[in-house]
Image (cartoon, rainbow, N blue to C red):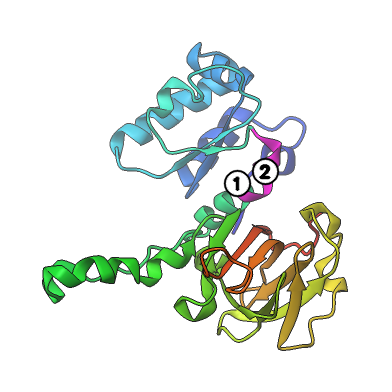
Amino acid sequence: MDVLLDVWDTRLGSDLASFMESGITSADRVIVVCSDQYVAKANAPTGGVGYEKNMLTPRLMDDLGSELVIPVIRNRTSSPKMAAFLGSAKYVDFLDDANYEEKYAELLHDIHGRQIQAVPPLGRNPFNLMPPAEVPNALRNDAARYVSPAASGGVAFDYTNNSGHYVIGSGDMAFTISMSEAGHGSIYVLQDPPNIHTVALAPNVTDFEEIADANLFDSSSRHRTIKVGDAAILRNLAGYYVVLLLDRVVTRESADDGQHQVEFRYRIQTNKSAVFS
């Protein structure tokens, strides 16, 4: 995919107005970075930003459903976040540096026409398939309860249910986590699910940033025994890495209510990097 950027594609003496016009009219997508300075100039409008705005607006008006412009919010300290001519276009928010990699992956997937969060299949209607008395039981045992599509978060579930499987992430970044009991305070994490390529143990890790390079950990075994205070590192078939930080394991013998439970935090590297620090 070709990218047009003035610092690359113009020389001293180039006609900048002509460059902007030809770029906007021929481009498949246009990224507009909405900073404080850009929004002020676009709303005025003044200078080159005003000229760009005047060229973009008619094209947007010709096709109100156009996805031509991708607004990127960066270095913006007041509302509204976007220039007025962009209307209600869906934007990607780069204001928080802590979410930079996640938002970069979202932008990259969209430009290449890939969904970062796949649309889940439509579930069956339990009211049409079974007597009303059985519906609550069906909802309680629905496998959709064992899914967290976000790229990071926390999970608590009974690992004796749903065959010990819990899905985190979505699309290319989906990981089917397979767990089984390994004794009090520990759990087996298995490589068995079809979208999992490798699984590794990182002992005595309590924070994601402690994983300097996920490739340095041995991933040659089908399963690893992860104890509370350890981390599991998994790589899926699409080449993404995730780190699981194990916070709690409850077995039937140690639980007051006799229920099994595992709790962990996770983070998927949305840029496919093996470096979490």
The N terminus: image quadrant: bottom right
Q: CA distance from mark 2 to mark 1?
A: 5 Å
Residue 15 location, x and y as percent? Answer: 64, 30
Magenta stretch holds residue 48: no
Residue 116 location, x and y as percent? Answer: 51, 59
Q: Is residue 166 visible?
A: yes
Residue, disc 2? 100
For the record, the magenta segment spans 96-103
Please name the residue shown 56% across and 22% down the image: 49
Residue 39 location, x and y as percent? Answer: 55, 20
- The disc labelled 1 sits on which kind of residue? Lys
State the image quarter where residue 9 is shown. top right
Q: Residues within 10 Å of mark 2 (few under 14, many from 20)?
A: some
* Viewer-side residue, 162 vs 171: 162
Residue, disc 1? 103
* Tag 2 and tag 1, C-beta contact below 8 Å: yes
Vertical side of 62 occupied by 84: above or below: above
Q: Is residue 125 visible?
A: no
Please name the residue shown 67% across and 49% down the image: 101
* Viewer-side residue, 172 vs 222: 222
Vertical side of 195 occupied by 268: above or below: above
Magenta stretch holds residue 98: yes
Residue 62 location, x and y as percent? Answer: 29, 36
- The disc labelled 2 sits on which kind of residue? Tyr
* Viewer-side residue, 160 vs 63: 160
Predominant secondary structure in magenta? helix
